[in-house]
Image (cartoon, rainbow, N blue to C red):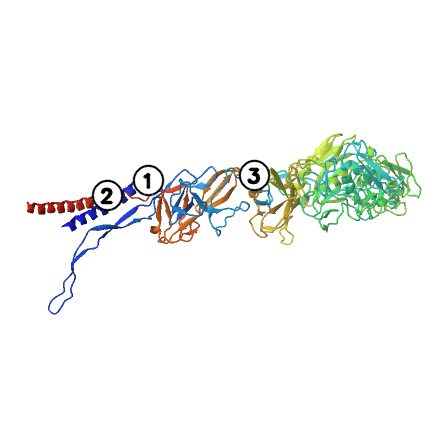
Amino acid sequence: MMRSLWSGVSGLNAHQVAMDVEANNIANVNTVGFKYSRTNFQNLLSQTVKSATAPQGNLGGKNSLQIGLGSSVSAVETMFKQGSIQNTDKNTDMAINGDGFFVVSADGGKTYRYTRAGDFTFDANGNFVDPNGYIVQGWLADPDTHTIDTAKGVQPISIPPGLTTPANPTSKIQIKANLNSGDHIKEMSGTKPTVDQTADMNGLYNANGEKISLIPDTDKITIAIDKDGNGTIDTNSEVFTFTYGKSTSKTDRKFTTIKDLLDEINEIIKDTTGTTPSSKYKVYLNGNGQIVDPANRIKTENTLISTNPVLENIFKALDGPSTTTESIKAVQNSFIGADDVGELFNASGDAFHLEDGQGLKVNINGLGETRKFIYTKTPINETEGCGSASGAYQPKENIVADSNEGLHWLYNSTTNDDNSRAFMNVNQKISFQIDTNNDGNIDDTLTYTYGKDFQTFSDLCCLLNSDFTNKNVNDIVSFQNGQMIESDGKIIRKVILKDSNDNTVSNTSQPLGRLSEIFSGINGTNDKTNTFYKNDTYYFHDIQDLAYIWQLAIDDSGDPLNSTSGNQGIVSINEDGKLDIKNTSANSFNINISGYPDDEKDNQLFTDAFSPLNGSLAAGGEALSQSINAATHTTSIDVFDSLGSKHTLTLHFRKTHTSENPNDPTVWKWYAEVPAPSTLDQPAFGYVKFNPDGSINSYNPPSLIFNPNNGANSGQAIQLDLGSMGKFDGITSFEAPSSTSGQTQDGYPGGDLENLVVDQTGTVIGVFTNGRSYSLAQVALAKFVNNEGLMSEGGTLFSASPNSGEPIIGTAGTGGRGTIQPSSLEMSNVDLSRSLTQLIVIQRGFQANSKSITTSDQMLNTLLQLKQ
């Protein structure tokens, strides 16, 4: 009877423990990271009254007789079922989705505790702590590389308050863009020479990017000029000093623009007759921005002196066999060079596609000839890089004159030089002594004034034939194959040429005398003159060539012997890409333009671009062509120096060559610029070449050298990534509008820590005010062989026990460890419905055990009552 009493008591004790466990579960129903516990019961040792016996003979075996002595709690198990995850608004909250525990320590990492509660925060010292003040353990990022080495042992995570990141200077730029390869463009800008000859030399640059800074009336340059072309220099009379300052004439030895200086030099270069040199001998500016001395008249050895060292270095190369200086550069379009006219577009963006042999026919009244401006794909007198190009503005040999030729620019031989030039000036006269009776005697003289009575050979033939008719002379004069021919052959006895003072000129050392020599072929015995030759063809390749030969046409029109009485003007390319002709002479002159050649093979788009120049140009007036444009694209990107200062780097792309031949790639040139005071070391220009499929063939240079000039480190190398060869991952050239689709750079300014966030690997990421984000630390997770073997330490902390096994520490998402869900917390895994149900079960069990006690008590009372 006492056994039942004590069995009931043991049952009460066991259910009381179960009640305590379940009450604890319910109490922690809202405890973050809490894991509920389960109570397991077991029976106590039974009292054996009889032991079991085996069967013997005919007697069967008997079971043992055992009486149970009650129950006890065998174990209280912690159930590590995944709790539900709840999103929070706190960046440093973390929940483990899967197996694993956060590792925390209260003694600097000497001992560890483990928890599923990820409600962490940073304390005043930057320690990453839980609500108990335990510091979360993990790995810290390298402060320079921002990489995390998880192979090392864990350590307390601490991020100093007020953390800053230093500035990172830009070291690489990547650009993705398309440069329009089509025949119609939208992004364009006016064509430009390398440097306009009318540009003020103060403020220009040399090939190395050094600025030419000149002080008016102070800076000078002294040059020796072999004006007679005899190869020697008379230092007393042929060394000239030119001063920077406003020029009022071609002989005042002053210059402001490049043209001023070239005009001064060309005025000095005279042949023995005192005639202004033809274009073959003129010093000029070519398309590469170089001053060219074709006749090698400028001598600099031991004589070149300048107050400006940059200007002096430019002219140093003009000596001996070298005929070109360093390039003179302008601020815009500096490092691309003058545009190839064949690659240009009209004002509407339509490509000219100018071919070899196409061009313009230009006549300026007083020029006496219709000049042909013919395009050639071969550069004219230009050297570029390691290669060279050969060409000439004029053909090497003259061609036979035609009947529409004036007597202004003629030659008495096929040699293209000043010693064969033969011409008349305006108001000079030609007289024909004729034998009207055909008796061998001179009966009459017909005199005509050039520029007044006639202009061309056709005009002259017409005058003679008209007078022959009036005088009943049976003779007809025609112009055939460069010669004036008589049908009779005996009427014209002598041709006399007179200057404007009525002096007969026959000296063949003078242009009028050489013209007289050609006419001497018609003399009463011979029926035709010698052959008249002309040189009315001029070639051009780039826009600077074209402006130059237009300048020659203006200079050569009017009176060639005395330019002050002839037409004068200045030809340039203005900012809008228009050919600009300014009439600086006292009189107006007419310009007439048509396409070349005539047989429907001319380029109408190109001809139309110059049609606004047709007509009369008044004295002091200005005429402009249509806008002539180049295909361009401009993109800018911000780069940073070592101080974190931002600078805008602008890349200007310009199409310079089109090809469908893989061995001759399409070329876009580019140059870079930065705002002052920053500078770029040269070369800050280069090219991008494209294959026929629009992919990159090559580009150069691969990098730029940037100098901030603000106290930051100079010589900052910036690598250019324009794409992979033969691929489409960078700059391409398709028939589509030019545009930049993407650009990146790796520089940034310094910044302060603004925010902290955590990713799924438990990496703590710092967000800084400069927009950069870096890994600062990574939280460690511990995994155990037997989670139920962990010892609860309170505060949702656990410690390892001999039965839990040693912690296996690693990163989230690896080795069977769960992942981390940031800005979330794992809630208690207590199932309230299960717990409440369990309370009923425990209550009933407790009540039932109490009944066994009270029943046993009643039985004892009954037993006691037997004595009474």
* Residue 119: % across, % down: 40, 41
Q: Which residue is outermost to the right?
A: 441
> What residue is drawn where x is 13% and y is 46%?
855
Name the residue that disc number 1 marks. Answer: 30
| Mark 2 Cα shell of 10 Å, populated few (<14), some (14-19), many (≥20) | some
For marks 2 and 1, give the CA distance.
18 Å
> What residue is drawn where x is 42% and y is 38%?
90
Q: Which residue is outermost to the front?
A: 867
Sequence order check: which comes first, mark 3 or mark 2? 3
Name the residue that disc number 2 marks. Answer: 839
Q: Could you say which quadrant of the image residue 217 lies in?
A: top right
In the shown orientation, is residue 190 left or right of residue 306?
left
Q: Could you say which quadrant of the image residue 118 lies in?
A: top left
Name the residue that disc number 3 marks. Answer: 750
Q: Is residue 807 above or below residue 30?
A: below
Residue 21 appears in the rendering:
yes
